[in-house]
């Protein structure tokens, strides 16, 4: 979301992933989440693409909070320094698509104390991913 509001000094956040198996990870995120790339670069000096993942936020946890979240979502401290948390409209469908595209199930879906439906997965390169469906989307099910 780009804005010209001077109260927002950062207009967009991008996370860049470097992988040894580009095609595998592109298929995992694009096909697994059902997202079309918004930009593709293939200029003979390597390959890259941009996938619009909606609004971006940055969460910063201390070790105690990371331990708490990992215990809830995975049953043990497991995530590294970076973990993706992706809000999806239908957790079950998103989970099944990602599993079909090479995700590893770390912990089955749970209802969190704050009312989100969460599942913990790992992408083919080992990145921890939390898929979550918010309470309002849970009530529509």
Image: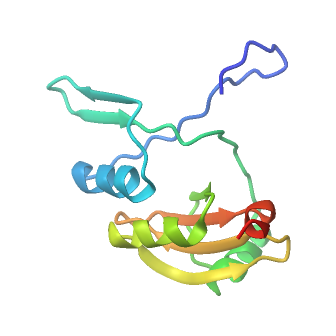
Instruction: Classify 12 as above or below 88.
Output: above
Drawn side of residue 106 relative to residue 43, left or right: right
For the image shown, how many numbered marks are present on the structure?
0
Instruction: Classify 16 as above or below 110.
Output: above
The image quarter in which residue 77 lies: bottom right
In the image, farthest residue toward the left = 44
For image coordinates 70% across by 24% down, the residue present is 10
Instruction: Classify 72 as above or below 19.
Output: below
Residue 131 x %, y %: 59, 65
Residue 111 x %, y %: 75, 79
Residue 92 x %, y %: 55, 73
For image coordinates 34% across by 66% down, the residue present is 124
For image coordinates 67% across by 76% down, the residue present is 70
Q: Quadrant of the C terminus?
A: bottom right
Drawn side of residue 58 relative to residue 48, left or right: right
Q: Quadrant of the N terminus?
A: top right
The image quarter in which residue 133 lies: bottom right
Drawn side of residue 132 relative to residue 38, left or right: right
Residue 36 x %, y %: 39, 40
Of 21 and 31, which appears nearest the observer?
A: 31
In the image, farthest residue toward the front = 140
Instruction: Classify 12 as above or below 93.
Output: above
For image coordinates 74% across by 69% down, the residue present is 138
- Colouring chosen for the image of the structure: rainbow
């Amino acid at each position: 979301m780009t804005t010209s509001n001077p109260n927002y000094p950062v207009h967009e956040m991008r996370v860049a992933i470097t992988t040894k198996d580009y095609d595998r990870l592109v298929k995992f995120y694009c096909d697994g989440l059902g997202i079309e790339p918004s930009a593709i670069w293939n200029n003979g000096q390597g390959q890259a693409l941009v996938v619009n993942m909606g609004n971006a936020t940055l969460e910063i946890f201390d070790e105690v909070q990371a331990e708490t979240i990992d215990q809830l979502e995975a049953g043990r401290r497991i995530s590294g320094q970076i973990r993706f948390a992706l809000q999806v409209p239908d957790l079950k469908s998103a989970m099944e698509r990602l599993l079909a595209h090479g995700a590893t199930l770390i912990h089955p879906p749970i209802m969190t104390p704050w009312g989100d439906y969460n599942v913990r997965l790992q992408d083919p390169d080992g990145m921890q991913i939390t898929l979550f469906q918010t309470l309002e989307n849970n009530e529509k099910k």
